[in-house]
Amino acid sequence: MKKIIKLEGLDCGHCATKIEDAVKKIDGVMSASVNFLNQKMVLEASDETFDAVLNEAKKLIKKIEPDISIKA
């Protein structure tokens, strides 16, 4: 499953790279890419693990950038 997640309040390209690198390390992530200009992340994981991966990704994003609003 592939899903686009809106990251409102993403401040800089460096933060986008940090988020992308952290999310890619989550077990079950097939691919992840963060576009700073569009403030979107494309997350891909298997259908069976997608919800768990998404929840873990949300936790990591909030840890890296607490002010971001995540809309999945």
Image (cartoon, rainbow, N blue to C red):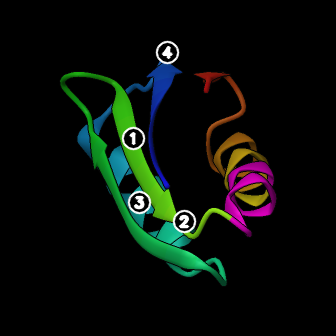
Q: Which residue appears at 62% of the width and 80% of the height?
A: 28
Q: Which residue appears at 57% of the width and 70% of the height?
A: 46
The reply to whether callout 2 and callout 3 are in contact (CB within 8 Å) is yes
- The residue wearing badge 2 is 23
Assign the magenta stretch its main secondary structure: helix
- The residue wearing badge 3 is 20
**Camera-nearest residue between 18 and 44:** 44
CA–CA distance in space, label 2 to label 3: 5 Å
Q: As shown in the figure, which amino acid type bears the numbered disc 1?
A: Met
CA–CA distance in space, label 4 to label 1: 11 Å
SS at mark 4?
Answer: strand
Q: As shown in the figure, which amino acid type bears the numbered disc 2?
A: Val
- Of labels 3 and 1, earlier in sequence is 3
Could you tell me residue 2's position as x and y percent? 43, 50
Q: Which residue appears at 77% of the width and 59% of the height?
A: 56
SS at mark 1?
Answer: strand
Q: As shown in the figure, which amino acid type bears the numbered disc 3?
A: Glu
- The residue wearing badge 1 is 41
The reply to whether callout 3 and callout 1 are in contact (CB within 8 Å) is yes
Could you tell me residue 43's position as x and y percent? 45, 53
- The residue wearing badge 4 is 8
Q: Which residue appears at 47% of the width and 23% of the height?
A: 6
Q: Is residue 12 magenta?
A: no
Asked if residue 22 lies left or right of residue 64, the reply is left
- Of labels 3 and 4, earlier in sequence is 4
- Of labels 2 and 4, earlier in sequence is 4
Asked if residue 41 lies left or right of residue 46, the reply is left
SS at mark 2?
Answer: helix
CA–CA distance in space, label 2 to label 4: 17 Å
Instruction: Find the magenta span and give its range.
Output: 48-55
Q: As shown in the figure, which amino acid type bears the numbered disc 4?
A: Glu
